[in-house]
Amino acid sequence: MAAKRTVTYDGNTYKVRSDKIEIPDFAAMSRIGALSWMCANTYPRGYSKAPSPLTGMGGAISLTVR
């Protein structure tokens, strides 16, 4: 399986939901238009198909033993 295409907008990189989607020129769009396109056509950041919702959160949780 090939890696998903990515788009970068405002310093953040997002993965496109489908290879069939045409990526627009964000410089020619308004900010609201670009963000609307991003919401509709890219995966949310941190998206995972893993069954556990805590997968990938290991660095966010720390324990202190006294």
Image (tube, rainbow, N blue to C red):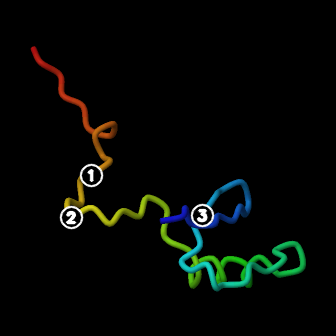
At 20% from the left and 59% from the top, the residue drawn is 52
**Decide: marks 2, 1 in contact (CB < 8 A)?**
yes
Residue for badge 1: 55
Q: Position of residue 31 (x, y in %)?
A: 77, 76
Q: CA distance from mark 1 to mark 3?
A: 19 Å
Badge 2 element? loop
Query: Which badge, 2 or 3, comes first in the chain's sequence?
Result: 3
Q: Nearer the viewer, residue 19 or 48?
A: 19
Left or right: 26, with 51 as reference point: right
Residues tagged 2 and 3 counted as in contact (Cβ below 8 A): no
Instruction: Locate residue 56 relative to residue 35 in the image: left or right.
Output: left
**In the depicted view, which residue is nearer to us: 47 or 5?**
5
Please name the amino acid that badge 2 sits on. Answer: Pro
Q: Could you give the CA–CA distance between mark 2 and mark 1, rounded to whole angstroms?
A: 8 Å
Dot 2 crowding, Cα within 10 Å, few <14, some 14–19, many 20+: few
Q: Tag 1's secondary structure?
A: loop
Measured in 3D between alpha carbons, the distance from the residue under mark 2 to the one under mark 3, in whole angstroms, is 21 Å
Q: Quadrant of residue 22?
A: bottom right
Label 3 sits on residue:
14
Q: Residue furthest right?
A: 28
- Name the residue: 30% across, 46% down: 57
Instruction: From the image, tell me which residue sits under label 2.
Output: 51
Tally of marks: 3
Q: Residue 30: give x, y in percent of width and height.
A: 82, 81
Query: Residue 40 in the image: x percent, y percent?
Result: 57, 85
Q: Position of residue 45 (x, y in %)?
A: 49, 62
Residue positioned 69% across, 65% down in the render: 7
Q: Residue furthest top?
A: 66
Q: Amino acid at mark 3?
A: Tyr
**As rendered, which of 20 and 8 lies closer to the eye?**
20
